[in-house]
Image (tube, grey):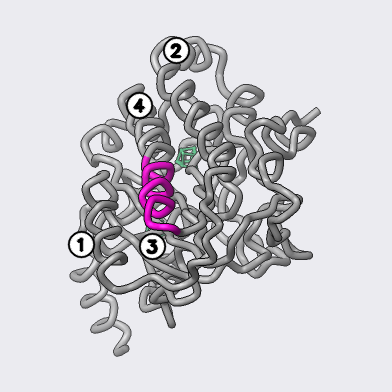
């Protein structure tokens, strides 16, 4: 019996839908949207016993804090000012971006949310999205598999949970309605959405590869009721898809053989890259080989692109 397949949504008090009112007009998941995977449940069921014991003691503070931030995000919907402010001026946008970077966020992008990227049976209040990335420090990730790598992954989950709530407060103080969506317990598939926001491109390891930090990032979103965000028009990182076909380093580095050499196509237009059942036991023990071994983790994006283009006469 697959726990994470039975429990398709977080408990009601953690779900944004529970805190929406009759006046809200949420956007529902599209016909081809995929089911959310609640990572802690996956780890509880498939993680190793040794790792579970370690996790409970060493990562407990991150889990508890992430859970608290999920509750804050969901409950905060009732704090929307409902002033009907639908345009953001250049100065406020600049101030928000400066504030976002002060919170330790590495990248920021804007896009419309494809309803098929809203998890099945989930809903969001607005479809204009601010997508944020946060760097995971390379040193602990490079120590994979290790507790240090796990700590860094869950530190960024926690920090992103805090960040989306602070960004939402910042925007609400200026009269905007919004819906923060944390990294753990979020409402959408953030990887293809970040791709739409031109923040990077999904690699064969299933993670967004960014120009700044490669796949060494985690993602989260804030949905906002504003019609004039500077939405990304195209994705300039698409070449990564062809590059990954010639690389396969992450596939070879995976101790569980969990990365598909040929990703599986889904109805929502995205792909499945990882067999989660196979990945969960090593992941619960701090495996992040698919990040640490990725050629982009060294931060050589532009160099790699230059060589690739020369070799392929692009
Ligand atoms: S986290 Fe480890 S086990 Fe999971 S896909 Fe990456 S390399 Fe494989
Ligand atoms: S290791 Fe290679 S194949 Fe895997 S995601 Fe990185 S670039 Fe793509």
How far apart are the alpha carbons under marks 2 and 4? 11 Å
User: What residue sits right under mark 2 in the picture?
Assistant: 54
- Disc 4 under 8 Å from ligand 1? The reply is no
Name the residue nearer the viewer: 234 or 242.
Answer: 234
> On residue 247, which mark appears?
3
Q: Say what secondary structure mark 2 lies in.
A: helix
Binning the other alpha carbons within 10 Å of mark 1 as few (below 14), some (14 to 19) or many (20 upward) gives some
Binning the other alpha carbons within 10 Å of mark 2 as few (below 14), some (14 to 19) or many (20 upward) gives some
Of marks 3 and 4, which one's residue comes earlier in the chain? Answer: 4
Position of 124 relative to 313 (above/below): above
Binning the other alpha carbons within 10 Å of mark 4 as few (below 14), some (14 to 19) or many (20 upward) gives some
> On residue 151, which mark appears?
4
- Disc 3 under 8 Å from ligand 2? The reply is yes
| Location of residue 102 in the rendering, given as x and y in whole percent from the top left corner | 21, 47
Q: Residue 2 is drawn in which quadrant?
A: top right
Please provide the residue range marked out in magenta. Answer: 163-175
Name the residue nearer the viewer: 303 or 209.
Answer: 209
Residue with the most extreme front position: 83
Q: State yes or no: discs 1 and 3 in contact (Cβ < 8 Å).
A: no
Of marks 2 and 4, which one's residue comes earlier in the chain? Answer: 2
Of marks 2 and 3, which one's residue comes earlier in the chain? Answer: 2
Binning the other alpha carbons within 10 Å of mark 3 as few (below 14), some (14 to 19) or many (20 upward) gives few
Of marks 1 and 2, which one's residue comes earlier in the chain? Answer: 2
> On residue 300, which mark appears?
1
Residue drawn at x 29%, y 89% is 313
Residue drawn at x 66%, y 65% is 115
How far apart are the alpha carbons under marks 1 and 4? 25 Å
How far apart are the alpha carbons under marks 2 and 3? 34 Å
How far apart are the alpha carbons under marks 1 and 3? 15 Å
Q: Disc 1 vs disc 3: which is toward the camera? A: 1
Residue drawn at x 71%, y 33% is 12
């Amino acid at each position: 019996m697959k726990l994470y397949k039975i429990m398709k949504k977080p408990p009601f008090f953690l779900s944004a839908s529970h805190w929406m009112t009759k006046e809200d007009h949420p956007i529902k998941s599209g016909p081809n949207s995929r089911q959310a995977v609640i990572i802690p449940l996956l780890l509880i069921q498939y993680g190793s016993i040794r790792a579970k014991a370690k996790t409970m003691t060493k990562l407990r503070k991150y889990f508890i804090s992430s859970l608290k931030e999920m509750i804050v995000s969901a409950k905060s919907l009732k704090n929307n000012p409902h002033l009907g402010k639908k345009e953001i001026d250049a100065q406020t946008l600049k101030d928000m971006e400066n504030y976002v970077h002060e919170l330790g966020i590495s990248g920021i992008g804007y896009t419309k949310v494809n309803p098929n990227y809203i998890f099945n049976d989930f809903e969001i209040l607005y479809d204009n999205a601010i997508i944020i990335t946060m760097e995971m420090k390379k040193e602990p990730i490079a120590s994979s598999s290790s507790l240090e790598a796990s700590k860094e992954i869950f530190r960024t989950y926690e920090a992103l949970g805090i960040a989306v709530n602070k960004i939402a407060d910042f925007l609400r103080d200026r009269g905007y309605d919004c819906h923060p969506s944390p990294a753990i317990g979020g409402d959408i598939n953030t990887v293809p959405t970040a791709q739409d926001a031109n923040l990077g491109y999904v690699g064969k390891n299933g993670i967004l590869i960014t120009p700044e930090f490669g796949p060494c990032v985690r993602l989260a979103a804030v949905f906002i009721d504003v019609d004039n965000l500077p939405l990304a028009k195209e994705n300039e990182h698409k070449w990564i898809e062809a590059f990954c076909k010639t690389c396969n380093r992450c596939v070879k580095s995976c101790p569980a053989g969990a990365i598909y050499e040929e990703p599986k196509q889904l109805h929502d237009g995205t792909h499945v890259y990882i067999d989660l059942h196979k990945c969960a036991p090593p992941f619960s023990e701090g495996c992040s080989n698919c990040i640490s071994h990725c050629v982009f983790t060294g931060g050589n994006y532009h160099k790699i692109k230059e060589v690739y283009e020369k070799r392929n006469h692009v």
